[in-house]
Image (tube, grey):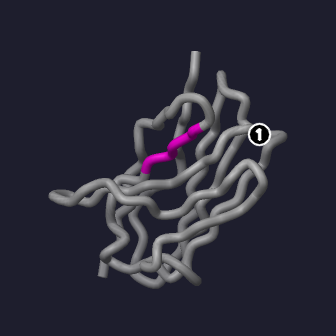
């Protein structure tokens, strides 16, 4: 059974930091490209950051220089370090894995108060 479980969300003041984790099971993690997406109320889900199986990273322009994605293959976990948070970062954050198939986590709420 495949599981992607996000954690680390919460309420933080603008300018603060949070670190999200996505722990996976049931997939060949090291072969998967992993991504963080977010969806704010009334908006489409968007890519935040992505890390390939080779460690190559890609970021949305809105989070470059503030967010960092990394992975620990030994723990089958991907992380999203979020710094200098802004109110517009408020959203539900989802973890996604893709190799042969695509899997999504259930999401974790991040709320940034101004």
Range drawn in magenta: 94-98
Quadrant housing residue 51: bottom right
Q: Which percent across, then down, holds residue 24?
A: 63, 34
Left or right? Give the position of 74 relative to 90: right
Please identify the dominant SS of the magenta region. strand
Residue 58, horizontal then vertical, whole percent: 59, 67
Pick the residue in front: 23 or 14: 23
Q: Position of residue 43 (x, y in %)?
A: 21, 60
| 57 relative to 15 in the view: left or right | right
Q: Quadrant of the N terminus?
A: top right
Asked if the magenta segment contains residue 97, the reply would be yes
Q: Which residue shows up at 47% across the image and 71% down it?
A: 60
Q: Against 63, is 102 above or below? A: above
Q: Residue furthest front?
A: 100
Quarter of the image with the C terminus is bottom left
Other-residue count near label 1 (Cα within 10 Å), few / some / many at <14 / 14–19 / ≥20: some
Total marks shown come to 1
Q: Position of residue 49 (x, y in %)?
A: 54, 62
Residue depicted at 69% across the width and 44% down the height: 77
- In the image, residue 6 above or below residue 25: below
Residue at the left extreme of this rendering? 42
Residue underneath mark 1:
30
Residue furthest right as drawn: 74
SS for callout 1: helix
The structure residue drawn at horizontal position 32% and vertical position 77%, both measured from the top left corner, is 87
- Looking at the image, the residue that sits furthest to the top is 1
Identify the residue at horizontal 64%, vertical 55% (top origin). 79
Pick the residue in front: 16 or 34.
Answer: 34
The answer to if 19 sits in the magenta stretch is no
């Amino acid at each position: 059974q495949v599981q992607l479980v996000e954690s680390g969300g919460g309420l933080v003041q603008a300018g603060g930091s949070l670190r999200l984790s996505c722990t996976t099971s049931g997939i060949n993690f090291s072969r998967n490209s992993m991504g963080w997406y977010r969806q704010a109320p009334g908006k489409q889900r968007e890519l935040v950051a992505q890390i390939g199986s080779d460690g190559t990273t890609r970021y949305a322009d809105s989070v470059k220089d503030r967010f960092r994605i990394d992975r620990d293959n030994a723990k089958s976990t991907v992380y999203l370090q979020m710094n200098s948070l802004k109110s517009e970062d408020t959203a539900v954050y989802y973890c996604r894995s893709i190799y042969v198939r695509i899997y999504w986590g259930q999401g974790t709420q991040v709320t940034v108060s101004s």
